[in-house]
Image (spheres, rainbow, N blue to C red):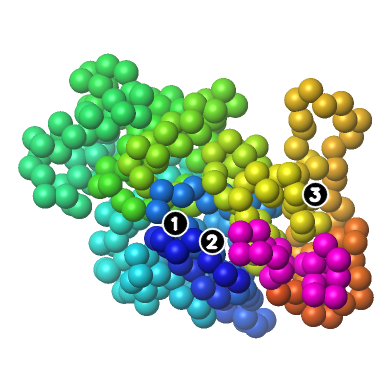
């Protein structure tokens, strides 16, 4: 698979993540490769269990034991980080890679005030005094849309609504001006109206800070509004990657077609949304060949025998035998 652009901030190549068990080794990510360029938002989509969050956790060095990176490499600004020790990764997290998770309460310490948490993050990663850090914390909270910052900064997480807590988490993620943010389902736990606000806020802030984002979500609508490119994952593999508009307008992989068909469209009468038959396979039962073939409406004999490589141009690639050299797209 070729890179999308030359100015790569994050480069993931042939990533393989395994989980040893008493019944054998389970392969959770298999041969995953992609790039994220400076200032780019890459959406990563797929059903639950596709490997989206695990890919983000691998990048940030948070794979839970006994899971391990068993192959491939991860480079940030050209430096290989998948071989870093836990201490080395702790220094990178926050300073070079920020994180926004689905439930803001998992990212915020309920026993510490918002001020304490922001000041601690700022003084840990930047050369600031506590007074300077507090002033910067107020600026960050204003930037993410928290009102009456002078009064609210010493409040505790439980005193904020879910949407306001997520804004605080975004402020924490941006505090040390990281190059990359891993945003894992950042809007799922929020009301629809608040989701739109958070998506717009995240997009604006990343543009202003020139921060790259790996946006992990199951919601193609969020990706359509936010991302520059989209990577589609299925059963631990990448199956399609390309510019958002191209993938939405011309989805190539049958799985991507299914995801797109499941989105209701305003102004378009549809009697029934598309349903992808079957379910994501368990890690212990990944089928041979293309792992989607048992659910694919366009399956061929070759699909069950050989894993498809990537076909297409360097901008829009798909791992599907329908686009093989001897097949017409």
Q: Residue at x 86, y 60 (%)?
A: 295
Can residue 199 be seen in this snapshot?
Answer: yes
Nearer the N terminus, badge 3 or badge 2? 2
The residue beneath circle 2 is 4
Query: Splitting the image into 4 quarters, where does residue 110 fall?
Result: top left
List x then y, in percent, for residue 201. Answer: 43, 31
List x then y, in percent, for residue 269. Answer: 87, 26
Question: Which one is in front in this view, the residue at disc 1 or the one at disc 3?
Answer: 1
Number of labels in the image equals: 3
Query: Which SS type dominates the magenta stretch?
Result: loop
List x then y, in percent, for residue 65. Answer: 47, 71
The residue beneath circle 1 is 37
Q: Which residue is drawn at 73% across and 44% down?
A: 249
Pick the front one: 143 or 133: 143
**Which label is found at residue 258?**
3
Spatial CA distance of label 1 from label 3 is 28 Å
Span of residues in magenta: 310-329
């Amino acid at each position: 698979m070729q890179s999308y652009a030359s100015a790569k901030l994050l480069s993931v190549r042939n990533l393989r993540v395994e989980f040893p068990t008493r019944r054998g080794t389970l392969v959770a990510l298999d041969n995953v490769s992609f790039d994220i360029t400076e200032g780019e938002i890459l959406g990563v989509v797929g059903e639950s269990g596709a490997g989206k969050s695990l890919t983000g956790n691998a990048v940030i060095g948070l794979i839970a034991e006994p899971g391990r990176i068993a192959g491939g490499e991860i480079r940030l600004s050209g430096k290989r980080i998948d071989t870093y020790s836990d201490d080395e990764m702790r220094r990178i997290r926050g300073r070079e890679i920020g994180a926004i998770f689905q439930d803001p309460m998992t990212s915020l310490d309920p026993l510490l005030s918002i001020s304490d948490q922001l000041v601690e993050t700022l003084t840990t990663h930047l050369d600031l005094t506590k007074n300077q850090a507090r002033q910067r914390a107020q600026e960050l909270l204003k930037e993410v849309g928290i009102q009456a910052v002078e009064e609210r900064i010493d409040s505790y997480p439980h005193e904020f609504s879910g949407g306001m807590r997520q804004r605080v988490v975004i402020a924490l993620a941006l505090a040390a001006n990281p190059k990359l943010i891993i945003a894992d389902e950042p809007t799922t736990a929020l009301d629809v109206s608040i989701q739109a606000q958070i998506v717009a806020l995240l997009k604006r802030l990343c543009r202003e800070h020139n921060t790259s984002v790996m946006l992990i979500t199951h919601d193609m609508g969020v990706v359509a509004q936010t991302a520059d490119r989209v990577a589609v994952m299925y059963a631990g593999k990448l199956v399609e990657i390309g510019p958002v508009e191209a993938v939405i307008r011309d989805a190539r992989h049958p799985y991507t077609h299914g995801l797109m068909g499941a989105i209701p469209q305003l102004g378009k009468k549809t009697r029934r949304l598309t349903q992808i038959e079957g379910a994501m396979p368990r890690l212990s039962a990944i089928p041979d060949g293309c792992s989607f073939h048992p659910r694919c409406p366009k399956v061929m004999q070759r699909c069950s025998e050989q894993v498809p490589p990537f076909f297409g141009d360097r901008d829009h690639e798909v791992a599907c035998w329908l686009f093989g050299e001897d097949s017409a797209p």
